Image (tube, rainbow, N blue to C red):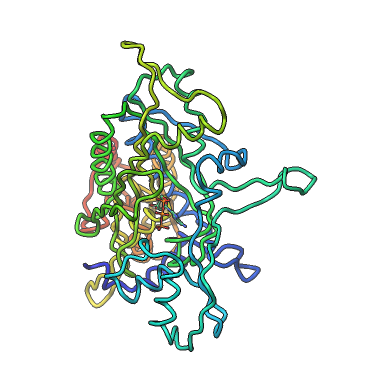
Amino acid sequence: MENLNKNFQEIVTHLKEIGFVYQGSSIYGGLANTWDYGPLGALITKNIKDLWIKEFIFKEENNVMIDSKILMNTKVWEASGHVKNFSDPLIENKVNGKRYRADHIIESIDSSLDPENMSNEEMYTWITENVPKWENSKANWNKIREFHLMFETNQGVVVDSKSKVYLRPETAQGIFVNFMNVQRTSRLKIPFGIGQIGKSFRNEVTPGNFIFRTREFEQMELEYFVKPGEDQKAYEYYINKSLEFSKLVGLKESSIRLREHGENELAHYSNGTSDVEFLFPFGWGELMGIANRTDFDLKSHAEHSREKLEYRDPMTNKVYVPFVIEPSMGLDRLTLAALVDSYKKEEIDNDSRIVLKLDKKIAPYKFAVLPLNKKIHSNEAKRVFRELIDKGISVSYDESGSIGKRYRRQDSIGTPFVLTIIDETATENKVTIRDRDSMKQITISLDEINNFI
Ligand code: ATP
């Protein structure tokens, strides 16, 4: 529950000031709800993506990766059901002119109600009867309309209905349409998985909570193809794997929970979905979803494309359409969760420090190299810095300001270890190493550090 007591605005301010995230297009007054990753944000997201590739692709014998395009044939989105179904119920308050998700309004007022179970007409009636005031103004509501979430654009020079394309709202469909390509060229036997990491776009009605809900975001998705009948086992396996992954990223067990969707909440393609949720300062929020997508996607694409999307078992020669288990995660949400969970303000000897106790695997820098005295130690420090870089480790170098201030800065960006270059570095190959969390410092030889790495 600790995260609920954290001041979210204070964390956001810190992340902006220190170089994790900036307001998008800030010199032009920004573009609403767009955020750019700064030097530290670019590194932490890269580290999380690398960890996902290691865990979900490399460690799983039969999993491979692809990189498909954001723009796809419009028929893909007809077959997937997005053209018809991908919308949210939008309601507008006539008095203040603002628009809201009707289901979110109901949930926020009466959490015992399940708006997924209500028709738009029922939601409208409930809201008009129960919400005479809203956000300090009178409420008088327009009828609910379905707001389509896919971004549209045009391809080529002539703008007509044939040139219309969508920005993908999920990366999964790029995998389904490549199912046969990948299976054939990689000679994969079921069960196997195809993963990808990439940008997705949704014209969300109510984006917000910093990088939690944005209109452009990055997903890490795996589609795991299994024989029908073996789907439940794989579904459970990937639920556990996703929970374990949250812990590998460094999230505390007490900050996460698993929530299974009720029957009425399930998407049209799914016969089982569970979300891993994280306790943000603004409440529980979905980090990732694990879904049993059945054979819906492959069958639907086969029907719309008139191509065969199926698998022939090499032992039995039986042909079937595989079932699909999908663990799907948002990179931006995981990053925010890791930053929130690790953020600490500590009082020490009449002073205070902000420290990000990030897991070593995802911290932007693993080490910082600081010459104790810039004039005397910087040549040696640069040598040590280059040696570490050559080992393939991300290292920060900082020689300006007092040593105390430089330690604080490394704490505040989450660097686990700081090496200070001292007189003994040149004479005895020794440095001091400072641990971020305990702030303890010892003198050791550089050879020991090399072994440690
Ligand atoms: P929500 O209910 O929060 O809108 P969703 O159930 O629609 O999410 P999915 O379609 O399951 O989300 O997408 C998989 C993952 O992609 C989510 O668990 C989340 O981490 C991420 N994601 C989805 N929409 C957004 C968004 N607008 N901004 C950032 N991440 C997102």
Give the x, y percent position of residue 374: 43, 56
Give the x, y percent position of residue 300: 48, 35
Q: Is residue 382 above or below residue 392?
A: below
Give the x, y percent position of residue 293: 37, 40
Q: How many circles with numbers are drawn on the protein?
A: 0
Which residue does the image show at 42% across and 61% down from the upper left?
212
Q: Is residue 91 visible?
A: yes
Give the x, y percent position of residue 279: 28, 63
Q: Is residue 422 visible?
A: no
Q: Who is closer to the viewer here, 448 or 44?
A: 44
Q: The C terminus lies in which quarter of the figure?
A: top left
Q: Who is closer to the viewer here, 154 or 65?
A: 154
Which residue does the image show at 38% across and 54% down from the upper left?
335
Left or right: where does residue 187 sit relative to residue 93? left
Q: Quadrant of residue 438?
A: bottom left
Which residue does the image show at 27% across and 67% down from the upper left?
3
Q: Is residue 378 above or below residue 255?
A: above
Q: Quadrant of residue 183?
A: top left
Ligand 1 rendered quadrant: bottom left
Left or right: where does residue 115 sit relative to residue 433? right
Q: The N terminus lies in which quarter of the figure?
A: bottom left
